[in-house]
Image (cartoon, rainbow, N blue to C red):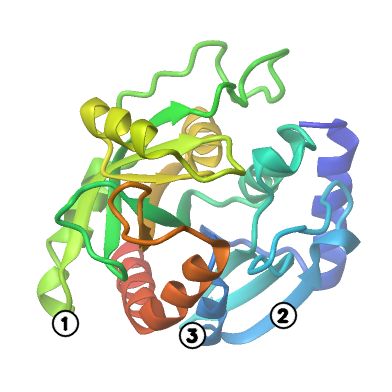
């Protein structure tokens, strides 16, 4: 987690900038999801690098901006971009936003990402609600000394992604103009895309989509007793399923096309949470 003083300093810094904010909902924007911020009113922005304990993003499509948005009279804390394990800076840059959101009073975290479709019924541009995950990153953000008094040594992970909220969201899909998928997300360390043989293995393990994020943040939220909702945008078909070589450009381009759907699902989720 880094020095505890960094968290205290970060909270004090944000209070000085925004007053004693009390967001109950937070959103982490994965690749291609950053433009969601357009749907929130009267947004205030602070660069990650200006916040004690946080560092600037390094990957294209991750702006590295913390945004305080409003939906009706409610505050939403939006992390526009994330850090990744493959960047080589360890777990602190990935976990710190979760600790910060928790310290500010966030009860529910919406985690978004761009993912490769493993389930052969999926199409590019589909959105998938995460039912569960498989951690294939080769590490675990909870390894080491217990970094927060709320975190147990052995957190239960029977229900990382809140089933009650997921069912409420899936029950409202009649209001959407597109199908909403559900499935299991498998997280790898990256940064290389997977081989066709690896994708076949992940199919056998029960994975529907693959990516390089989200699982560490979901694990930390769960350990802190925060409710988690996970949404993947299927931005490409996985290796061996796609008919062409994979690139990060494909991910960003597909997300741009899917953006209207992404905005609709996030608005629907927030409305559901505020019911």
Assess disc 1: are there few (<14), some (14-19) or many (≥20) residues with their C-alpha within 10 Å of its C-alpha.
Answer: few
State the separation of the CA atoms marked 2 and 3: 13 Å
25 vs 85, left or right, is left
Q: CA distance from mark 1 to mark 3?
A: 18 Å
Quarter of the image with the C terminus in it = bottom left
- Compared to 31, does 143 lie above or below? above
User: Residue 163 location in percent, x, y?
Assistant: 24, 42
Q: Position of residue 174 (x, y in %)?
A: 9, 74
Residue shown at 74% from the left, 65% from the top: 64
Please rate how many residues cluster around mark 3, counting C-alpha atoms within 10 Å: few if below 14, some from 14 to 19, many from 20. some
Q: Position of residue 54 (x, y in %)?
A: 82, 51
Between circles 1 and 2, the one closer to the viewer is 1
Q: Residue at x 24, y 51 (%)?
A: 166
User: Which badge, 1 or 2, comes first in the chain's sequence?
Assistant: 2
Q: Residues within 10 Å of mark 2 (few under 14, many from 20)?
A: few
Residue at the far front in the pictured view: 244
Disc 1 + disc 3, Cβ < 8 Å: no
Q: Which mark is residue 269?
A: none
For disc 2, the marked residue is 44
- Compared to residue 27, the image places residue 102 above or below, namely above
Q: Which residue is mark 3?
A: 39
Q: How many marks?
A: 3
Name the one closer to the observer, 212 or 150.
212
Query: Residue visible at 47% across and 40% down?
Result: 226
Check if mark 1's residue and mark 2's residue have beta carbons within 8 Å: no
**Residue closest to the eye, 102 or 28:** 28
Q: Say which quarter of the image contains residue 65.
A: bottom right
Location of mark 1 (residue)? 177
- Quarter where residue 58 is shown: bottom right
Instruction: Indicate the quadrant containing the N terminus: top left, top right, bottom left or bottom right.
Output: top right
Residue 125 is situated, as x and y percent measured from the top left of the image, at 31, 71
């Amino acid at each position: 987690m880094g020095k505890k003083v960094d968290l205290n300093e970060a909270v004090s810094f944000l209070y000085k900038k925004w007053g004693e904010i009390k967001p109950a909902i937070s959103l982490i924007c994965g690749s291609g999801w950053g433009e969601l911020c357009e749907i929130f009113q009267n947004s205030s922005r602070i660069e990650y690098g200006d916040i004690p304990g946080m560092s600037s993003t390094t990957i294209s499509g991750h702006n590295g901006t913390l945004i305080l948005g409003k939906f009706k009279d409610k505050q939403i804390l939006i992390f526009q971009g994330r850090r990744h394990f493959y960047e080589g800076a360890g777990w602190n840059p990935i976990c710190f936003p979760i600790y910060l959101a928790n310290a500010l009073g966030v009860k529910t975290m919406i985690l978004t990402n761009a993912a490769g479709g493993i389930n052969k019924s999926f199409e590019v541009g589909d959105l998938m609600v995460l039912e569960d995950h498989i951690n294939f990153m080769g590490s675990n953000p909870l390894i080491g000394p217990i970094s927060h008094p709320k975190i147990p040594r052995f957190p239960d992970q029977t229900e990382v992604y809140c089933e009650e909220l997921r069912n409420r969201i899936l029950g409202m899909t009649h209001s959407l103009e597109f199908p909403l998928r559900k499935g299991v997300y498998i997280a790898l360390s990256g940064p290389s895309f997977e081989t066709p043989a690896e994708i076949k293995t992940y199919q056998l393990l029960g994975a529907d989509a693959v990516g390089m994020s989200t699982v560490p943040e979901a694990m930390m939220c769960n350990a802190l007793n925060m409710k988690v909702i996970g949404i993947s945008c299927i931005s490409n078909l996985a290796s061996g399923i796609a008919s062409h070589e994979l690139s990060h450009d494909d991910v960003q381009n597909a997300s741009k096309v899917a953006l209207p759907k992404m905005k609709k699902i996030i608005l629907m989720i927030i409305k559901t949470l505020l019911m």
